[in-house]
Protein backbone atom coordinates (compact mmCIF):
# COMPACT_ATOMS: atom_id res chain seq x y z
CA UNK A 1 0.00 0.00 0.00
CA UNK A 2 1.43 3.37 -1.02
CA UNK A 3 1.62 6.19 1.51
CA UNK A 4 0.73 9.88 1.33
CA UNK A 5 1.90 12.41 3.93
CA UNK A 6 -0.95 14.76 4.84
CA UNK A 7 0.42 18.16 5.96
CA UNK A 8 -2.26 19.75 8.13
CA UNK A 9 -2.87 21.72 11.30
CA UNK A 10 -5.56 19.24 12.40
CA UNK A 11 -5.29 15.76 13.82
CA UNK A 12 -8.01 13.32 12.69
CA UNK A 13 -9.25 12.91 16.27
CA UNK A 14 -9.51 16.67 16.94
CA UNK A 15 -12.93 18.31 17.25
CA UNK A 16 -14.30 20.17 14.23
CA UNK A 17 -15.32 19.54 10.66
CA UNK A 18 -11.87 19.66 9.06
CA UNK A 19 -10.48 17.00 11.39
CA UNK A 20 -13.51 14.80 10.73
CA UNK A 21 -12.93 15.05 6.99
CA UNK A 22 -9.32 13.92 7.39
CA UNK A 23 -10.42 11.03 9.59
CA UNK A 24 -12.86 9.94 6.86
CA UNK A 25 -10.12 10.32 4.25
CA UNK A 26 -7.81 8.02 6.18
CA UNK A 27 -10.45 5.30 6.26
CA UNK A 28 -11.81 5.68 2.73
CA UNK A 29 -8.48 5.89 0.89
CA UNK A 30 -7.43 2.49 2.22
CA UNK A 31 -10.01 0.98 -0.13
CA UNK A 32 -8.06 2.55 -3.01
CA UNK A 33 -4.59 1.44 -2.01
CA UNK A 34 -3.44 4.54 -0.11
CA UNK A 35 -2.45 4.89 3.54
CA UNK A 36 -2.59 8.41 4.98
CA UNK A 37 0.29 9.38 7.27
CA UNK A 38 -0.65 12.53 9.20
CA UNK A 39 2.00 15.25 9.32
CA UNK A 40 0.65 17.52 12.04
CA UNK A 41 1.85 21.15 12.18
CA UNK A 42 1.05 22.79 15.55
CA UNK A 43 0.56 26.43 16.44
CA UNK A 44 2.21 28.90 16.97
CA UNK A 45 3.33 28.55 13.38
CA UNK A 46 6.24 30.98 13.45
CA UNK A 47 7.95 29.01 16.20
CA UNK A 48 6.98 25.56 14.92
CA UNK A 49 7.77 26.13 11.23
CA UNK A 50 11.36 24.86 10.98
CA UNK A 51 10.94 22.09 13.59
CA UNK A 52 7.86 20.91 11.69
CA UNK A 53 9.74 20.80 8.39
CA UNK A 54 12.57 18.75 9.94
CA UNK A 55 10.17 16.39 11.70
CA UNK A 56 8.01 15.83 8.62
CA UNK A 57 11.01 15.18 6.39
CA UNK A 58 12.14 12.46 8.80
CA UNK A 59 8.58 11.11 8.91
CA UNK A 60 8.31 11.03 5.11
CA UNK A 61 11.58 9.13 4.80
CA UNK A 62 10.80 6.70 7.62
CA UNK A 63 7.34 5.88 6.24
CA UNK A 64 8.55 5.67 2.63
CA UNK A 65 6.00 8.29 1.53
CA UNK A 66 5.54 8.76 -2.23
CA UNK A 67 3.33 11.91 -2.23
CA UNK A 68 3.19 14.91 0.11
CA UNK A 69 -0.34 16.34 0.28
CA UNK A 70 -0.50 19.82 1.86
CA UNK A 71 -3.84 21.41 2.66
CA UNK A 72 -4.57 25.06 3.43
CA UNK A 73 -5.92 26.89 5.47
CA UNK A 74 -3.59 28.46 6.66
CA UNK A 75 -1.88 28.92 3.32
CA UNK A 76 1.67 28.65 4.70
CA UNK A 77 1.12 24.90 5.08
CA UNK A 78 1.77 24.73 1.34
CA UNK A 79 5.24 26.16 1.93
CA UNK A 80 5.88 23.38 4.43
CA UNK A 81 4.52 20.85 1.94
CA UNK A 82 6.87 22.18 -0.75
CA UNK A 83 9.95 22.06 1.50
CA UNK A 84 9.15 18.58 2.80
CA UNK A 85 8.62 17.25 -0.73
CA UNK A 86 11.89 18.78 -1.93
CA UNK A 87 13.97 17.57 1.01
CA UNK A 88 12.45 14.08 1.04
CA UNK A 89 12.49 13.61 -2.73
CA UNK A 90 8.74 13.02 -3.07
CA UNK A 91 6.06 14.47 -5.32
CA UNK A 92 3.81 17.27 -4.05
CA UNK A 93 0.02 17.49 -4.33
CA UNK A 94 -1.29 20.88 -3.14
CA UNK A 95 -4.93 20.85 -2.09
CA UNK A 96 -7.03 24.00 -1.68
CA UNK A 97 -9.77 24.11 0.93
CA UNK A 98 -10.07 27.88 0.49
CA UNK A 99 -8.71 30.21 -2.18
CA UNK A 100 -5.13 31.24 -1.43
CA UNK A 101 -4.66 34.69 -2.95
CA UNK A 102 -8.33 35.65 -3.47
CA UNK A 103 -9.59 34.58 -0.05
CA UNK A 104 -12.76 36.64 0.59
CA UNK A 105 -11.95 37.25 4.27
CA UNK A 106 -8.81 39.28 3.51
CA UNK A 107 -8.33 42.81 2.30
CA UNK A 108 -6.53 43.11 -1.02
CA UNK A 109 -4.13 45.60 0.59
CA UNK A 110 -3.25 43.41 3.57
CA UNK A 111 0.41 42.33 3.91
CA UNK A 112 -0.93 38.81 4.43
CA UNK A 113 -2.48 38.99 0.95
CA UNK A 114 0.92 39.68 -0.60
CA UNK A 115 2.33 36.66 1.23
CA UNK A 116 -0.61 34.59 0.03
CA UNK A 117 0.04 35.67 -3.54
CA UNK A 118 3.64 34.49 -3.25
CA UNK A 119 2.55 31.11 -1.87
CA UNK A 120 0.00 30.74 -4.66
CA UNK A 121 2.71 31.37 -7.27
CA UNK A 122 4.88 28.76 -5.54
CA UNK A 123 2.03 26.24 -5.66
CA UNK A 124 1.32 26.93 -9.33
CA UNK A 125 4.95 26.70 -10.45
CA UNK A 126 6.28 23.95 -8.15
CA UNK A 127 3.47 21.54 -7.23
CA UNK A 128 3.22 18.31 -9.21
CA UNK A 129 -0.56 18.52 -8.86
CA UNK A 130 -3.17 21.01 -7.61
CA UNK A 131 -6.66 19.93 -6.60
CA UNK A 132 -9.68 21.39 -4.89
CA UNK A 133 -13.14 20.12 -4.15
CA UNK A 134 -15.97 21.92 -5.89
CA UNK A 135 -17.85 24.28 -3.59
CA UNK A 136 -15.13 26.64 -2.36
CA UNK A 137 -15.13 30.35 -3.29
CA UNK A 138 -13.13 29.82 -6.44
CA UNK A 139 -14.39 30.21 -10.03
CA UNK A 140 -14.20 27.04 -12.11
CA UNK A 141 -11.87 28.72 -14.60
CA UNK A 142 -9.63 30.44 -12.02
CA UNK A 143 -6.41 28.62 -12.89
CA UNK A 144 -7.17 28.51 -16.59
CA UNK A 145 -7.61 32.29 -16.60
CA UNK A 146 -4.86 33.31 -14.20
CA UNK A 147 -2.25 30.62 -14.82
CA UNK A 148 -2.90 29.07 -18.25
CA UNK A 149 0.48 27.35 -18.26
CA UNK A 150 -0.43 25.26 -15.20
CA UNK A 151 -3.76 23.79 -16.31
CA UNK A 152 -2.34 20.34 -17.05
CA UNK A 153 -1.48 19.99 -13.35
CA UNK A 154 -4.83 21.23 -12.03
CA UNK A 155 -7.97 19.22 -11.33
CA UNK A 156 -11.25 20.30 -9.82
CA UNK A 157 -12.77 17.41 -7.86
CA UNK A 158 -16.54 16.91 -7.37
CA UNK A 159 -18.43 18.16 -4.34
CA UNK A 160 -17.00 16.42 -1.28
CA UNK A 161 -20.33 14.96 -0.19
CA UNK A 162 -21.27 13.13 3.00
CA UNK A 163 -19.93 9.84 4.31
CA UNK A 164 -22.79 7.58 3.38
CA UNK A 165 -21.72 4.61 5.50
CA UNK A 166 -21.49 6.71 8.66
CA UNK A 167 -24.96 8.19 8.22
CA UNK A 168 -26.59 4.91 7.28
CA UNK A 169 -25.08 3.11 10.28
CA UNK A 170 -25.95 5.83 12.83
CA UNK A 171 -29.11 5.79 14.89
CA UNK A 172 -31.51 8.73 14.78
CA UNK A 173 -31.69 10.65 18.06
CA UNK A 174 -35.38 11.35 18.49
CA UNK A 175 -36.20 14.89 19.53
CA UNK A 176 -39.19 16.35 21.29
CA UNK A 177 -40.54 18.91 20.71
CA UNK A 178 -40.17 19.95 17.04
CA UNK A 179 -36.47 20.76 16.62
CA UNK A 180 -34.52 23.11 14.36
CA UNK A 181 -30.77 22.42 14.52
CA UNK A 182 -27.76 24.45 13.46
CA UNK A 183 -24.31 22.83 13.53
CA UNK A 184 -21.14 24.84 12.96
CA UNK A 185 -19.51 28.20 13.48
CA UNK A 186 -20.67 31.77 13.12
CA UNK A 187 -18.45 34.59 11.86
CA UNK A 188 -18.59 38.10 13.26
CA UNK A 189 -20.21 40.58 10.89
CA UNK A 190 -20.56 37.96 8.16
CA UNK A 191 -22.52 34.83 9.07
CA UNK A 192 -24.62 35.32 12.21
CA UNK A 193 -28.06 34.11 13.37
CA UNK A 194 -29.82 37.47 13.76
CA UNK A 195 -32.18 37.01 10.80
CA UNK A 196 -33.21 33.59 12.05
CA UNK A 197 -33.80 34.83 15.61
CA UNK A 198 -35.95 37.73 14.40
CA UNK A 199 -38.00 35.43 12.17
CA UNK A 200 -38.29 32.80 14.89
CA UNK A 201 -39.63 35.48 17.23
CA UNK A 202 -42.19 36.58 14.66
CA UNK A 203 -43.32 32.98 14.20
CA UNK A 204 -43.72 32.49 17.96
CA UNK A 205 -45.79 35.64 18.28
CA UNK A 206 -48.17 34.19 15.71
CA UNK A 207 -48.15 30.72 17.28
CA UNK A 208 -47.35 31.18 20.98
CA UNK A 209 -48.37 27.60 21.83
CA UNK A 210 -46.12 25.97 19.22
CA UNK A 211 -43.98 23.21 20.71
CA UNK A 212 -40.68 24.01 19.06
CA UNK A 213 -37.02 24.56 19.98
CA UNK A 214 -33.89 25.70 18.15
CA UNK A 215 -30.62 23.95 19.02
CA UNK A 216 -27.20 25.39 18.17
CA UNK A 217 -24.04 23.25 18.24
CA UNK A 218 -20.84 25.26 18.11
CA UNK A 219 -19.72 28.74 19.07
CA UNK A 220 -22.28 31.11 20.54
CA UNK A 221 -21.88 34.80 21.32
CA UNK A 222 -23.64 36.55 24.23
CA UNK A 223 -24.90 39.07 21.66
CA UNK A 224 -26.98 36.28 20.10
CA UNK A 225 -28.59 35.57 23.47
CA UNK A 226 -29.46 39.27 23.77
CA UNK A 227 -31.01 39.19 20.28
CA UNK A 228 -33.00 36.07 21.18
CA UNK A 229 -34.23 37.78 24.35
CA UNK A 230 -35.30 40.82 22.36
CA UNK A 231 -37.14 38.55 19.89
CA UNK A 232 -38.86 36.76 22.76
CA UNK A 233 -37.42 33.31 22.01
CA UNK A 234 -34.61 32.99 24.55
CA UNK A 235 -36.50 30.20 26.32
CA UNK A 236 -36.83 28.33 23.01
CA UNK A 237 -33.07 28.17 22.37
CA UNK A 238 -30.70 25.43 23.52
CA UNK A 239 -26.99 26.00 22.95
CA UNK A 240 -24.37 23.25 23.01
CA UNK A 241 -20.60 23.14 22.88
CA UNK A 242 -19.13 21.51 19.77
CA UNK A 243 -19.41 17.72 19.89
CA UNK A 244 -17.57 14.99 17.95
CA UNK A 245 -18.95 14.31 14.50
CA UNK A 246 -19.95 10.76 15.43
CA UNK A 247 -22.20 12.21 18.13
CA UNK A 248 -23.51 14.96 15.87
CA UNK A 249 -24.77 12.64 13.12
CA UNK A 250 -27.62 11.13 15.23
CA UNK A 251 -28.59 14.67 16.29
CA UNK A 252 -28.86 15.81 12.69
CA UNK A 253 -30.80 12.71 11.70
CA UNK A 254 -33.27 13.24 14.55
CA UNK A 255 -33.88 16.94 13.86
CA UNK A 256 -37.02 18.09 12.08
CA UNK A 257 -35.27 20.97 10.29
CA UNK A 258 -31.60 21.81 9.70
CA UNK A 259 -30.67 25.49 9.62
CA UNK A 260 -28.14 27.01 7.26
CA UNK A 261 -27.12 30.68 7.51
CA UNK A 262 -25.14 31.99 4.56
CA UNK A 263 -25.58 35.77 4.65
CA UNK A 264 -25.30 38.04 1.63
CA UNK A 265 -21.60 38.92 1.50
CA UNK A 266 -20.51 38.63 -2.18
CA UNK A 267 -17.38 36.81 -1.02
CA UNK A 268 -19.61 33.87 -0.11
CA UNK A 269 -21.43 33.76 -3.45
CA UNK A 270 -19.73 30.65 -4.83
CA UNK A 271 -19.51 28.72 -1.58
CA UNK A 272 -21.35 25.46 -0.97
CA UNK A 273 -20.27 24.73 2.62
CA UNK A 274 -19.39 21.31 3.93
CA UNK A 275 -22.30 21.30 6.39
CA UNK A 276 -24.57 21.06 3.33
CA UNK A 277 -23.40 17.47 2.81
CA UNK A 278 -24.02 16.44 6.41
CA UNK A 279 -27.46 18.01 6.15
CA UNK A 280 -28.13 15.98 3.00
CA UNK A 281 -26.89 12.82 4.72
CA UNK A 282 -29.30 13.44 7.60
CA UNK A 283 -32.21 13.52 5.12
CA UNK A 284 -33.99 16.35 6.93
CA UNK A 285 -35.30 19.52 5.23
CA UNK A 286 -32.99 22.53 5.18
CA UNK A 287 -34.03 26.06 6.09
CA UNK A 288 -31.48 28.24 4.34
CA UNK A 289 -31.19 31.97 5.08
CA UNK A 290 -28.95 33.30 2.33
CA UNK A 291 -28.94 35.51 -0.74
CA UNK A 292 -31.24 33.60 -3.11
CA UNK A 293 -28.79 34.07 -6.00
CA UNK A 294 -25.88 32.42 -4.20
CA UNK A 295 -24.76 29.05 -5.47
CA UNK A 296 -25.79 27.17 -2.31
CA UNK A 297 -29.31 28.66 -2.58
CA UNK A 298 -29.65 27.48 -6.17
CA UNK A 299 -28.35 24.05 -5.23
CA UNK A 300 -30.87 23.62 -2.39
CA UNK A 301 -33.76 24.74 -4.61
CA UNK A 302 -32.76 22.64 -7.61
CA UNK A 303 -32.29 19.49 -5.55
CA UNK A 304 -35.53 19.93 -3.59
CA UNK A 305 -33.69 19.96 -0.26
CA UNK A 306 -35.70 22.60 1.58
CA UNK A 307 -36.63 26.28 1.68
CA UNK A 308 -34.46 29.27 0.79
CA UNK A 309 -35.35 32.67 2.24
CA UNK A 310 -33.45 35.94 1.75
CA UNK A 311 -31.55 37.75 4.46
CA UNK A 312 -33.11 40.72 6.27
CA UNK A 313 -36.62 39.30 5.84
CA UNK A 314 -37.94 38.13 9.20
CA UNK A 315 -41.44 37.66 7.78
CA UNK A 316 -40.14 35.21 5.16
CA UNK A 317 -38.23 33.34 7.86
CA UNK A 318 -41.38 33.15 10.00
CA UNK A 319 -43.43 31.89 7.06
CA UNK A 320 -40.81 29.24 6.28
CA UNK A 321 -40.76 28.03 9.88
CA UNK A 322 -44.55 27.83 9.88
CA UNK A 323 -44.56 25.81 6.66
CA UNK A 324 -42.01 23.39 8.02
CA UNK A 325 -43.66 23.16 11.44
CA UNK A 326 -47.13 22.49 10.03
CA UNK A 327 -45.84 20.06 7.40
CA UNK A 328 -47.21 21.99 4.45
CA UNK A 329 -43.83 21.77 2.70
CA UNK A 330 -43.06 18.56 0.86
CA UNK A 331 -39.53 17.27 1.44
CA UNK A 332 -39.12 15.02 -1.55
CA UNK A 333 -35.66 15.30 -3.12
CA UNK A 334 -34.63 13.06 -5.97
CA UNK A 335 -33.19 9.86 -4.40
CA UNK A 336 -30.21 10.22 -6.74
CA UNK A 337 -29.04 13.14 -4.56
CA UNK A 338 -28.16 10.70 -1.79
CA UNK A 339 -26.23 8.50 -4.20
CA UNK A 340 -24.38 11.22 -6.07
CA UNK A 341 -22.98 13.35 -3.27
CA UNK A 342 -21.03 10.90 -1.13
CA UNK A 343 -17.47 10.87 0.11
CA UNK A 344 -17.18 7.29 -0.97
CA UNK A 345 -17.39 8.56 -4.56
CA UNK A 346 -15.06 11.51 -4.08
CA UNK A 347 -12.49 9.35 -2.27
CA UNK A 348 -12.18 7.40 -5.50
CA UNK A 349 -11.53 10.60 -7.45
CA UNK A 350 -9.01 11.82 -4.86
CA UNK A 351 -7.20 8.48 -5.04
CA UNK A 352 -7.00 8.91 -8.82
CA UNK A 353 -5.37 12.33 -8.29
CA UNK A 354 -2.84 10.71 -5.95
CA UNK A 355 -2.18 7.95 -8.49
CA UNK A 356 -1.62 10.50 -11.23
CA UNK A 357 0.62 12.72 -9.12
CA UNK A 358 2.70 9.75 -7.94
CA UNK A 359 3.17 8.68 -11.58
CA UNK A 360 4.17 12.18 -12.68
CA UNK A 361 1.30 12.33 -15.16
CA UNK A 362 -0.85 15.41 -16.01
CA UNK A 363 -3.93 15.67 -13.80
CA UNK A 364 -5.91 17.34 -16.56
CA UNK A 365 -5.90 14.13 -18.61
CA UNK A 366 -7.98 12.30 -15.97
Image (cartoon, helix red, strand yellow):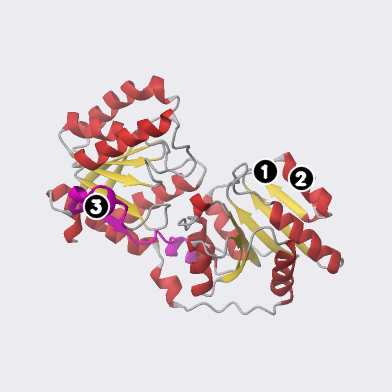
Which is more foreground, mark 2 or mark 3?
3
Residue, disc 1: 220
In this rendering, position of residue 117 left or right of residue 149: right
- Residue 100 shown in magenta: no
- Mark 3 nearby-residue class (10 Å; few <14, some 14–19, many ≥20): many
Residue, disc 3: 154
Residue 353 shows which numbered tag?
none
Query: Which is nearer the eye, 190 or 241?
Result: 190
Q: Position of residue 325 (x, y in %)?
A: 73, 72
Query: Mark 2 to mark 3: distance in Å?
Result: 45 Å
Dot 1 falls on a residue whose secondary structure is loop
- Mark 1 nearby-residue class (10 Å; few <14, some 14–19, many ≥20): some
Marks 1 and 2: CB-CB under 8 Å? yes
Q: Position of residue 74 (x, y in %)?
A: 41, 36
- Mark 2 nearby-residue class (10 Å; few <14, some 14–19, many ≥20): some
Please give the name of the residue rendered at 79% of the width and 44% of the height, measured from the top-left corner: 226
Examine the rendered structure and indicate whether residue 86 appears above or below residue 361.
Answer: above
Which is more foreground, mark 3 or mark 1?
3
Query: Mark 3 to mark 1: distance in Å?
Result: 38 Å
Query: Mark 1 to mark 2: distance in Å?
Result: 8 Å
Question: In which image quadrant can residue 121 be found?
Answer: top left
Please give the name of the residue rendered at 28% of the width and 48% of the height, measured from the top-left corner: 146
Q: State the residue lying farthest toward the front.
A: 109
Residue, disc 2: 225
Amino acid sequence: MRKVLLVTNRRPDDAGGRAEKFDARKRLLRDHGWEVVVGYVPEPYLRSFLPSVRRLVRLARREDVVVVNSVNNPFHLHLIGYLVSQLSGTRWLAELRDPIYTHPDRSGLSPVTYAAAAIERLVVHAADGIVWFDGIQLPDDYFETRYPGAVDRVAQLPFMGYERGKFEDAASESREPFTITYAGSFYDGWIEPYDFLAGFGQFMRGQPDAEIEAHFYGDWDPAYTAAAREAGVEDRLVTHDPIPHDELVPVLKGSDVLLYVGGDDPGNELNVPSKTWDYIGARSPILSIVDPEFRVARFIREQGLGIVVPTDDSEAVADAIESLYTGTVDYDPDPDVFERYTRERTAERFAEALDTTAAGEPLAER
